[in-house]
Amino acid sequence: MVKEILINVEELEKRVAILEDNVLEEFYIERTGYQKIVGNIYKGRVESIVPGIQAAFVNIGLEKHGFLYVSDIIEPVADYEEVIPAKASHRKEDRRGEHLIQNILKKGADVIVQVIKEPIGTKGARLTTQISLPGRYLVLMPTEEKSGISKRIEDIKERERLKGIMKTIGLPKGMGIILRTAMTGHGKREMIRDIRYLLKLWRKIKINSEKQSALSLVHEEYDLILRIVRDYFTEEVGKLIIDSKDEIVKVVHFINSLAPHLKNRIELYHGQGALFEKYNIEKDIEKIYERKIFLKSGGHIVIEPTESLIAIDVNTGRFVGRRSLEETVLHTNLEAAKEIARQLKLRDLGGIIAIDFIDMENPGNRMKVFNVIEEALKSDRAKTNLLPFSNFGVVEMTRQRMRQSLESVSYEDCWYCEGRGTVKSHITMSILALRQVKKYLKDTGKKAAEVSVHPNIASRILNEDRDYLRSLENIFGAKIMVRPDINCHIEDIKIQ
């Protein structure tokens, strides 16, 4: 398997595509001005305590108060197998009333919290007092003495080898670590390097928390590019290609402290066209937002997000190529199972998901389809829980939702149809229009371009995104005219 990471950097957004054998498997966007807060650590203040739901609302200086469940105070959030348990004297005894939120926190008290889930809709961020600092190979838990190994490391011999190394590592009292899947195949040197780096980071966080007053940011998580480098740029990746000179300097400096042996796999893109177009993935990115996904066989799947769950329907479509109906259905379902797992990662869909496969009479065939989707989900970094086929031929599952879905970031409710559908947001259309202008000037070499767009998009380009427009004019020595056209659909772009 050939794995590559492509990073496209523009003034208004950064995009990351992860390819496996030239197929787009994962895609991430971070917009300029978008406040991504998962992983951030704040010094907050308890605003109210609600015993009925065993939670507290904590003001961390943002528009909405975060909420802190009692379970996120007394239990570690990581999914791992405990290897080195906490000493008896440090264990939290299960006494009557001790674990009630009203007995742990008081209104008006200052508290150090970390964001574990982005604000979604009307809900504020979900918080925890169980701080975790991710490194390349392990996660440091500075407030939790237990240590363990990620359950995603399944090889028994490898787990035993890593357990042996862990028991030789001396950690400060009251702290623990969790070995990440990236630790597979590595030894004590990498473990110690990560621990030293994270302990230094924790000391800095402690100093900041003591100096700063409540309602302040104590530690900010890395931006999209550095998170991808830390979490995804492993020995399995053949190349990491970036089209920005400024960002590649940051990445090389960062990887020198984490995994210097991978430095020679980082490349600056020098191609003529845009990076994503060179790899033919712009069309694949556009398809991420489509409701209907066609399969190679001729069948298709339909993805319909609703308020309460995500419904996925599988259909044979034009595919009638097997000897019997049961074989045709099995082939379509097997192909759909792999594609559904891929689409869940691409779109970053979360919550309750119901998959309506085509009915199969043979129980063995149902098991084959279930095994395929179960195997395909193993590469998903989000936590998933999959249930077997129901009597109605439906597979139910849940997928961890850490942030807004890709569609909700790029689209808004359609005001043409009063919210019955969606259209691309103003910022998305502004980015697309300026990207097309950039390509037009680069490909043609012309010194003037006129772009016609809907008046609302023209207003966005000429106001909020004016600086980027002017920078394109300076780069190409060209004049760019933006013409509002009332006859343009909100998603139309015309360049001449």
Image (cartoon, rainbow, N blue to C red):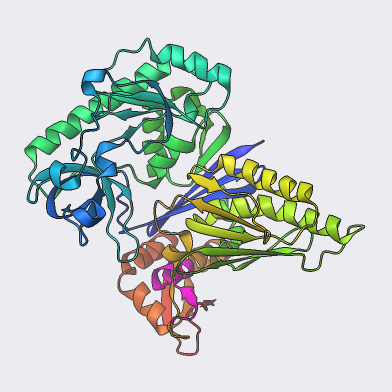
Q: Give 258 or 484, whichever is nearer the viewer.
A: 258
Q: Residue furthest top?
A: 168
- The residue lying at 19 percent from left, 53 percent from top is 51
**Is 301 on the left-hand or right-hand side of 329?**
left
- The residue lying at 24 percent from left, 49 percent from top is 68
Q: Report the magenta residues as a range.
A: 419-434
Q: Quadrant of the N terminus?
A: top right
Number of numbered callouts drawn: 0
Q: Kindly indicate the quadrant of the structure image that contains residue 155.
A: top right
Give coordinates of residue 15: x percent, y percent.
46, 52
**Is 98 on the left-hand or right-hand side of 451?**
left
Q: Residue furthest right?
A: 323
Q: Give 222 or 239, whichever is nearer the viewer.
A: 222
Give coordinates of residue 438: x percent, y percent.
49, 64
Magenta stretch: includes residue 431? yes
Magenta stretch: includes residue 65? no
Give coordinates of residue 176: x percent, y percent.
31, 24
Q: Kindly indicate the quadrant of the structure image that contains residue 122.
A: bottom left
Give coordinates of residue 469: x percent, y percent.
37, 67
Say if 237 sits above or below 195 in the image: below
- Could one spot residue 154 in this view of the protein? yes
- The residue lying at 40 percent from left, 59 percent from top is 404
Say if 245 sits above or below 329 in the image: above
